Amino acid sequence: MLLLLLTLTASAGDPVTAIQELVEHSEFRAATQRCNKLDDDLASTPALQEACAMAHMGMLGDEGDAAAWKALAETWTGTSAAETAIERAAELALSELPPDTAPDRLLAMATAYPGTAGAQQATERAAAKALTTAVEAADVLTYRAFREKYAGTPQADEAREKEAEAALADVEQYDTPLAWRQLRSHYPELTAVAEEREIQAVGRAIAETASLSIPCKVPTASGPDDAPPPRCDTIAKETVISATWTTPEGYTAKAGLVGWDGEQSIQLSSLQRRIGPAPYASAYAQIAVAGKGEATEEGWTMTLPVDLKRPPDLEFRGYAVQIRVLGGEAALLPFVVSEAWEDARRRR
């Protein structure tokens, strides 16, 4: 105590230093008494405000509740003690709320202590509870409202993922080109699956109107769901092959000749290396080039530069007009070509 008195005597001419030394020695009551005597000087002396705020915070100690700490923060706004006090107030306010506190009450607490760690924790607790309710509803609008209300929380990111899942489920029920286009527009993370399904939806619309013009016989169908492809032995040079269809509004379709293995399309250029120097390689190459064809007002057409046959010893059953939308295969109009080009190398 004697040392403290000597220290205070030495700093008597500087009230800020004197108060700071009292606070340092936990003499908070004496410090606040000095502050009370200097009340008229507080407004014009920031350093004195800071010292007195620390003194009053020391007086409060560990006994104050949330309201007391918040009052301290409001009284000494602008000081570091006020920043500490509001954080402490938020921490205590949150601890006073039971585990089953409703989300709206947690948000009200967060609103009362903006910018504090306690407010952030309260918001995240509210978001966790509210997300459980949103998951039970599992619809797009509920998730969207949740994200707006709890923006900035980890749960908002989770809600975005679940919102996209709900939107996907909704669009699957409609399964139209427009619905899939809107889905990938609103949810870029679903672009891959939405674009694939959009192409399929466009393809179904095209297939309903598509017609292939080719001088081949169409086998008799074995049932109402059977649609056997046209069948030719060979197709003569200069024959015109064409296809017509109606493209849904807002889309552009392109077509071309491809190979067909009985189930899937085969890009003609992909087999040229395997064909190599075969005697029919030149004819095949001409078909591959001419197969790009030309677009018409109603679809697509090409003129055969050579007799059309199929390569031997490959997985060809015939050819098909492939209709592409958005870079993907939307529809396939196949036809069988049974006669193969001769390969003299096979007889050696």
Image (cartoon, helix red, strand yellow):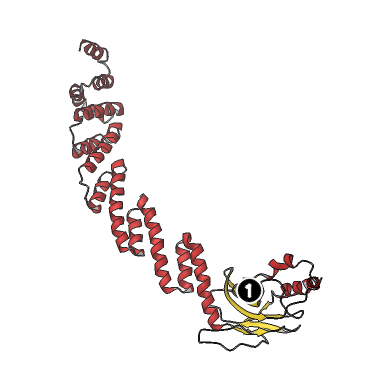
- Identify the image quadrant of the N terminus: top left
Instruction: Using the rendered image of the protein, determine whether residue 86 is visible from the camera's viewpoint.
Output: yes
283 sits to left or right of 268: right
Residue 301: percent from left, percent from top: 67, 81
Is 29 situated left or right of 17 in this image? left
Amino acid of disc 1: Asp
What is the count of numbered marks?
Answer: 1
Instruction: Say which residue label 1 marks.
Output: 261
**Residue displayed at 24% across by 43% down:** 94
Q: Secondary structure at mark 1?
A: loop
> Residue at the location (22% across, 51% down)?
105
Task: Indicate whether 322 appears above or below 29.
Answer: below
- Name the residue: 49% across, 64% down: 193
Residue 156 in the image, given as x and y percentages of width and height: 36, 54
Q: Position of residue 93 (x, y in %)?
A: 22, 42
Image location (x, y in percent) of residue 183: 45, 66
Near-viewer residue (244 or 86): 244
Give the image quarter of residue 6.
top left
Quadrant where the C terminus sits is bottom right
Examine the rendering and report whether any part of residue 300 can be seen. no
Front-lying residue, 115 or 280: 280
Q: Nearer the viewer, residue 174 or 88?
A: 174
- How many neighbours does mark 1 have within 10 angstroms: few (below 14), some (14-19), or many (20 or more)? some
Task: Examine the rendered structure and indicate whether residue 161 appears above or below residue 118.
Answer: below
Tell which residue pokes out farthest to the front in this image: 348
User: In this orientation, which residue lies closer to the viewer: 231 or 179?
Assistant: 231
Taking the spot 60% from the left edge, 72% from the top edge, the residue there is 264
